Image: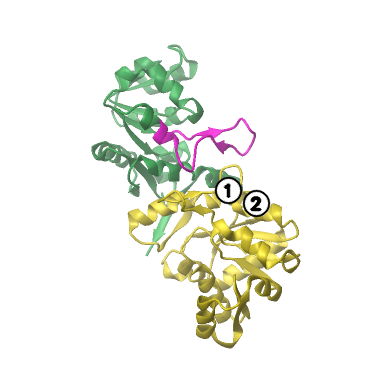
Chain colours: A green, B yellow
């Protein structure tokens, strides 16, 4: 769902996008390609990583490292990886817990495992429809980004602006992913209280 | 600081307030009493717990259980305990980590240890000046509460309204404290980014 939403938005903005999956003939990827036309294509994680200049990790957090290994280290080298994933662990029932948190984060784990990739954590604190269409809320709230590479964050900021985002907050290096990933437990509670995933965090200040 | 802020506000609203400490002659508690006049008093945790009809846990999260034990189980029996504390662990350097999180929370630990106390987690997601004066922000944002006892939450809601709060969100039972306590890591990051503790979380929705 996240990859579908972001991939479709990028196609609409004029980018060529390849959707990666475990297999070259993933049915959902094929359906996504048909909906999105000539600028859209699909293939293995490896093919998609080789194709892309900027990569988005839209996998479930529990399998992100495996997906990136399948993508192939040589295909990731030097590229920006926008990490949208959250390390939600559903194996112990609902609500999910986090498989990594507090003194570490999925964003940091990925950055440590792939040291020559420019990991930028972003967009992981909201529903995927809002990620690519903040105008769905009258007050869109904030989107948080963090990462170790300033130029990569500038590039991701440009993409977020093209998605319609204004309240982009840079929280510093990738260790700030501990903070944004730990927003998920209260996000899940809020979804239950509000009865909808169509909400966002906004930081109000003096 | 948190106890000072909340205690002073409660005195200003007409309540009689006793500030508890480890010792009966705590200098800060004495200074607080002098500033707040006849309605204010101070003493041991035990004396304060015996005195209060509604109790506020404004201790540092790492020592909250010890403070509550010193307060005495018999003095807590059946009372509302507004738990404002966060389990911030500064022992491993900055930024602090959480000594309990993810699949448990300080609010839940306190509720399990003191089963006949009505624990309501509240106010732990903002600076103590904002806790008692949400009008300091032009848009005050939200204050989250959770707990197992509906009547206790209603009573705490009345107190929060008397503090000036409008955006009070009830997130359900005390296990929602996992969510609100895990807001602290991003709160600390945000304080660094914004250069001020005078901000709050606001939930924006359709």
Residue assigned mark 2: B108
Residue A78 in percent (x, y) is at 26, 26
Residue assigned mark 1: B178
> Mark number for residue A169?
none
SS for callout 2? helix
Residue B50 in percent (x, y) is at 71, 73
B78 vs B81, left or right, is right
Which quarter of the picture shows residue B23?
bottom right
Chain-order first, disc 1 or disc 2: 2
Chain letter for the residue marked with disc 2 in the picture: B
B145 vs B5, left or right, is right
Residue A139 in percent (x, y) is at 42, 52
Q: Mostly what secondary structure, the magenta segment?
A: loop
Which quarter of the picture shows residue A71?
top left
Residue A57 counted in the magenta span: no
Closer-to-camera residue (A104/A192): A104
Chain letter for the residue marked with disc 1 in the picture: B
Closer-to-camera residue (A172/A206): A172
SS for callout 1? helix
B121 vs A68, left or right, is right
- How busy is the neighbourhood of tag 1: few (under 14 within 10 Å), some, or many (20 plus)? many
Q: CA distance from mark 1 to mark 2?
A: 8 Å
Q: Can residue A84 be seen here?
A: no
Residue A91 counted in the magenta span: yes
Residue at 41% from the left image edge and 41% from the top image edge? A177
Instruction: For the residues labelled 1 and 2, say whether their Cβ atoms are less than 8 Å apart.
Output: yes
Q: Is residue A146 above or below residue B205?
A: above
First to last magenta residue range? A84-109
């Amino acid at each position: 769902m996240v990859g579908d939403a972001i991939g479709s938005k990028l196609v609409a903005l004029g980018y060529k996008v390849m959707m990666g999956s475990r297999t070259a003939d993933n049915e959902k990827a094929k359906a996504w390609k048909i909906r999105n036309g000539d600028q859209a294509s699909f293939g293995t994680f490896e093919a998609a990583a080789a194709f892309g200049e900027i990569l988005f990790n839209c996998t479930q957090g529990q399998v992100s490292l495996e997906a990136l290994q399948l993508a192939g280290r040589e295909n990731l080298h030097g590229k920006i990886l926008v990490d949208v994933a959250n390390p939600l662990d559903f194996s112990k029932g609902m609500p999910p817990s986090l498989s990594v948190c507090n003194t570490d984060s999925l964003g940091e784990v990925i950055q440590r495992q792939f040291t020559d990739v420019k990991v930028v954590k972003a967009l992981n604190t909201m529903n995927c429809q809002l990620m690519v269409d903040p105008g769905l809320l009258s007050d869109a709230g904030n989107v948080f980004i963090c990462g170790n590479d300033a130029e990569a964050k500038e590039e991701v900021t440009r993409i977020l602006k093209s998605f319609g985002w204004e309240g982009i907050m840079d929280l510093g290096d990738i260790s700030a992913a501990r903070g944004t990933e730990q927003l998920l437990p209260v996000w899940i509670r809020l979804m239950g209280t509000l009865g909808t995933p169509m909400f966002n965090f906004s930081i109000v200040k003096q």
